[in-house]
Image (spheres, rainbow, N blue to C red):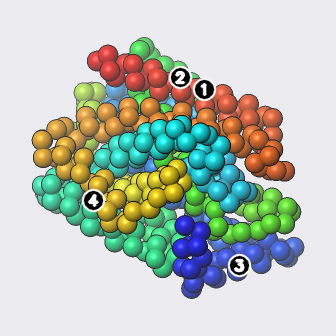
Amino acid sequence: MTKRKDENKAGSDAKTIANALNILGSKKKSNVISRLLPFMGPAFIASVAYVDPGNFATNIQGGAQFGYLLIWVIVASNLMAMLLQTLAAKLGLVTGMNLAEHCREQFSKPVSLAMWLLMEIVAMSTDLAEFLGAALGFQLLFGIPLLLGAVLTGIATMLILGLERFGFRRLEAVISSMVGLIALCYLLETFIVRPDFMMVMRHTFVPRLAGAESVVLASGILGATVMPHAIFLHSALMQGRIVVRDKARLRSLYRFEIVDVAVAMGVASCVNAAMLIMAAATFYSTGHTAVATIEEAYRTLQPLLGSAARWIFGLSLLLSGLSSSTVGTGAGQVIMQGFIQKHIPIWLRRLLTMAPSLLVIGYGLDPTRTLVLSQVVLSFGLPFAVIPLVIFTSRRDIMGELVNLRITTVAASLTAALIVALNLYLIFKTLSG
């Protein structure tokens, strides 16, 4: 994988790497934005997993049923995700190996094989949600049947993934632009719905729940936020992107990557909060608390807010599905290559991961219900990404001088324990009806 990336480092990639190395090796003060730009990108690709169609389903349901109550859950979830994505970036940056490769090296072959199979199921479940979301976006916006929308999604994601042959920078630029457009859509939605900003501020900083159902939804929001495949992918995106061996420059590079994570995950957090705020201000405040599906939300927006809000919502869903499906396919490649050192053509993986979505559409299953169930499958895989990540980044023999500080390890361990506990609760409640 590293060899292939090295061969593709031409044009904008070579310029990006040269600028980054010059900045790391220079003490001259320059414009903050120009200093940051060469290092921005990997976290934005990973952040797509945090604004995928699964988030639409949980955030809309949370806002419609409980108003602004669960905004603090989104903020807390994204802070946890920010910490985990920073550790994932550091692992790939310092060691030159991604999380899946470390699992293969550190664990026995049977354990590694079992983890690979589980992560493949998780990756396919993730792709199912993202693929369905994009197909649903095509249907809602243009009246295209779900099956044809699924085919269009497959073609579009293949075209976007094809940009990788021209180097990492073009793919980063396209995905980052799509994240930016999703954020813009929800900025416009926020202006249209005119939420109660005092209530928004209150529930951002004051944690509160209202009964067992709110706990289930809070767990669902967390499950839809912290994605295992994004952790594996982010560690892979950092290996070989900008390579430095000098300890001082490595620390400086790591600080730049922290900024990349903070900005990208900050944008993702704002988008998720805006989804819930839109649902709270539009549905909860008008008594439409039963709105629980993406299709219902889309249909209800027009009579309440006009066609502009409906189109903006549909466009953001389509962009979310296309970008996250593209990233999910790339993550699947990283997982297979890391765990078992095998590689299949990207078009073949795209066809294989399309199959469950086509079956769901062919059988006429409810898309939103399928999205929710896919989040439950993700919950099974989370511990097998989060716990090894915390273990590896806490070991000095692996991380050297950039090993986690004790307080970082404690915070990451508590985060892992909370994620595992809440997702077990979500699984139990979902399977028990």
Q: Amino acid at mark 2?
A: Ala
**C-beta proximity under 8 Å, tags 3 and 2:** no
| Residue under label 1 | 417
Residue placed at 37% from the left, 18% from the top?
429
| Residue under label 2 | 421
The span from disc 2 to disc 1 (Cα, nearest Å) is 6 Å
Residue placed at 55% from the left, 42% from the top?
109
Can residue 433 be seen at all in this image of the molecule?
Answer: yes
Q: Amino acid at mark 3?
A: Asn
Q: Position of residue 342 (x, y in %)?
A: 46, 58
- Mark nearer the N terminus (4 vs 3): 3
The span from disc 3 to disc 2 (Cα, nearest Å) is 44 Å
The secondary element bearing badge 2 is classed as: helix
| Residue under label 4 | 351
The secondary element bearing badge 1 is classed as: helix
The quadrant of the rendering that contains the C terminus is top left
| Residue under label 3 | 19
Q: Residues within 10 Å of mark 3 (few under 14, many from 20)?
A: some
